[in-house]
Amino acid sequence: EVQLVESGGGSVQAGGSLRLSCTVSGFSRDDSDLGWYRQAPGNECELISTISRDGTTYYSGSVEDRFTISQDNAKHAVYLQMNSLKPEDTAVYYCAAALILRTLAPWYGGSCARAARDPESGYWGQGTQVTVSS
């Protein structure tokens, strides 16, 4: 059974930092992507960062230059270092794994939770809450 388990969420003041971790088990990495989505209240599920097995990274414009994704292949883990946090970064953050991680297809209605229930969208963690106060 594939399991992705996130940790490291919490509450922080604006300008602060948090580091999210995700451990992956039961999954053959091969050439798959690991990455992070988030869903803020009232917003659609957003793909914010991915990393390929060879270390190629992607960042959405909303987090570029503030967040850094990294991986430890030996530990089957992916991390998201989040600096200069803003109140608009408040969201539930989901770790995900798939051959290719993409912006969510429209039939998920913008819901990370709905995508997480569909094996076609890859494997997802349960989500971890990040709250940034002003």
Image (cartoon, helix red, strand yellow):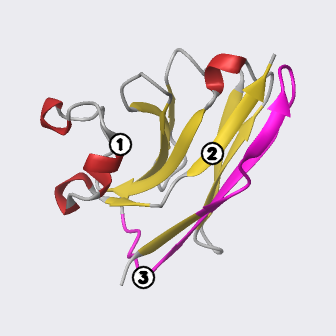
Magenta-tinted stretch: 6-30
Spatial CA distance of label 2 from label 3 is 24 Å
| Lower sequence index among marks 1 and 2 | 1
Q: Type of residue at label 1?
A: Cys
Q: Are marks 1 and 2 in contact (CB under 8 Å)?
A: no
User: Vertically, is 56 above or below 63?
Assistant: below
Element at label 3: loop
Q: Nearer the viewer, residue 27 or 42?
A: 42
Q: Which residue is mark 1?
A: 112
Q: Is residue 71 left or right of residue 59?
A: right
Task: Determine the image quadrant of residue 74.
Answer: bottom right
* Image position, residue 38 (x, y; %): 49, 36
What residue is disc 2 on? 129
Q: Residue at x 73, y 18 (%)?
A: 86
Distance of label 3 from label 1 (alpha carbons) = 22 Å
Disc 1 crowd rating (10 Å Cα; few below 14, some 14-19, many 20+) is many
x and y percent of residue 44 in the render? 36, 26
Q: Looking at the picture, which amino acid does disc 2 mark?
A: Gln
Q: Nearer the viewer, residue 55 or 109?
A: 109
Q: Which residue is mark 3?
A: 26
Pointer 2: residues within 10 angstroms few (<14), some, or many (20+)? Answer: some
Q: Residue at x 42, y 22 (%)?
A: 42
Q: Position of residue 37 (x, y in %)?
A: 46, 40
Residue type at the position of mark 3: Gly
